[in-house]
Amino acid sequence: MVQVWNPNGKYRVVSTKPMPGTRWINLLIEQDCRVEICTRKKTILSVEDIIALIGDKCDGWLSCVYVSVFQLTEDWGETLFSALSRAGGKAFSNMAVGYNNVDVNAANKYGVAVGNTPGVLTETTAELAASLSLSAARRIVEADEFMRAGLYDGWLPNLFVGNLLKGQTVGVIGAGRIGSAYARMMVEGFKMNLIYYDLYQATRLEKFVTGMSVTYAEFLKANGEQPVTWKRAASMDEVLREADVISLHPILDKTTYHLVNKERLAIMKKEAILVNCSRGPVIDEVALVEHLKQNPMFRVGLDVFEDEPYMKPGLADLKNAVVVPHIASASKWTREGMATLAALNVLGKIKGYPVWSDPNRIEPFLNENVPPPAASPSIVNSKALGK
Ligand SMILES: NC(=O)c1ccc[n+]([C@@H]2O[C@H](COP(=O)([O-])OP(=O)(O)OC[C@H]3O[C@@H](n4cnc5c(N)ncnc54)[C@H](O)[C@@H]3O)[C@@H](O)[C@H]2O)c1
Ligand SMILES: O=C(O)[C@H](O)CO
């Protein structure tokens, strides 16, 4: 049930799951850590399971399981942080960029550093959002099922007619790292016009699209095509009204819970495509199921669900929904990099290293040919802990 590496290591680091690659294990072993990896088949561990794993001596705690706050399991709050602290644990890291499953105030109370893994999953997650956009627009899953069922008996003018992306408007809600990467892909790749909404101005994205639309505009015009346009929306509703494809990329907190609800679904275009690779509860999934039933031309691509791992009743039966099991960050390079960043977050705390200055620039930690910087790549509560 628990695999142990370097049993005589001075510091104990526990991972709730086997994580991809071996670099993360080697980096910990090189620094005198004993690495314990829980190999239980159970996907989501309960608070009791985790307390048993923590035991009574734990210098770092590495969790690779992300769970939504709406699941009661692996909800890192008061109980787990106090157990970790009693065992001498000083650090915890999600193997994820999102940390809505973590009660950071509870971690602060016990002086536990909370790590996450930004940056390394930006492009991979954006690529999945792009894949879902295309799959929904061109009805790939429905068509695949049709072929496998042996139903194809010849080309027909009306067979699986979907939406063209070129020249349409892509809307991004939450234009942070992943939202911006997705926006660039859709503008560059499919010549879509962009409208975005975020609490803050996405300066780098704007510069990119502006630069691109200026030089690219000449090229497109010279080739008899329309240049792409972009704008920052004053409200989220403006994006919902105007865009043909909308992708959600905000964090999950109380401001984004059920951000897309019945009323907001109603203002979207009847043939719009909605993609969610952020967190399930950003959409009111019951309202979404009803909307999909009432509007068969409205399509969704979902990587995340409100009650993960479950889907709300009715969703699985709908042809206008493409659903995948929270795999947005699942490329080999990214998952191995996430494991490395998570391990280095706890190792940095064990070694007393400072926190890396810019969690958006984590490349130096990912170069396998040189030792990583002596720093924790990303600790979300470093200020609260006075680091
Ligand atoms: N499905 C997956 O496997 C997967 C993978 C990676 C990340 N994620 C999710 O994506 C989220 C975003 O990741 P990121 O690295 O781009 O983070 P980020 O912090 O760079 O971007 C989040 C953006 O959301 C914006 N935002 C916050 N509240 C908002 C609101 N009320 N309205 C509009 N915008 C708001 C922020 O200003 C920020 O620009 C993560 O927190 C995580 O939950 C999911
Ligand atoms: O927040 C995250 O990083 C995802 O949910 C897992 O990749």
Image (cartoon, rainbow, N blue to C red):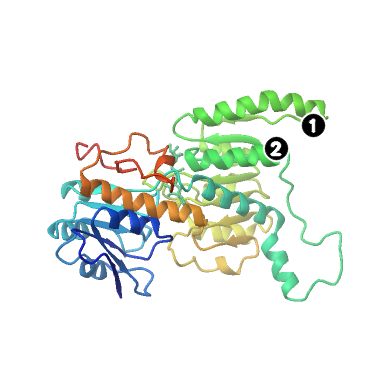
Locate the C terminus by quadrant.
top left
Can you say whether 202 is above or below 309 in the image?
Answer: above
Kind of residue at badge 1: Glu
246 sits left or right of 309 in the view: right
Query: Disc 2 beta carbon < 8 A from ligand 1?
Result: no
Task: Give the residue displayed 25% in from the left and 57% down from the top.
Answer: 61
Which element type, helix, strand or loop, lies under badge 2?
loop
Residue 165, located in which quarter of the rendered image?
A: top right
Q: Earlier in the sequence, mark 2 or mark 1?
A: 2
Asked whether disc 2 touches disc 1, contact meaning CB atoms under 8 Å apart, the reply is yes
- Of residues 102 and 342, which is closer to you in this image? 342
Kind of residue at badge 2: Lys
Q: Position of residue 221 (x, y in %)?
A: 79, 26
Locate the N terminus by quadrant.
bottom left
356 sits left or right of 361 in the view: left
Task: Give the residue displayed 78% in from the left and 74% down from the top.
Answer: 151
The residue carrying mark 1 is 225
Q: CA distance from mark 2 to mark 1?
A: 10 Å
- Of residues 134 and 27, which is closer to you in this image? 27
Task: Give the residue displayed 51% in from the left and 29% down from the top.
Answer: 204
Residue 79, located in which quarter of the rendered image?
A: bottom left
156 sits left or right of 122 in the view: right
The residue carrying mark 2 is 191
Residue 47 visible at all: yes
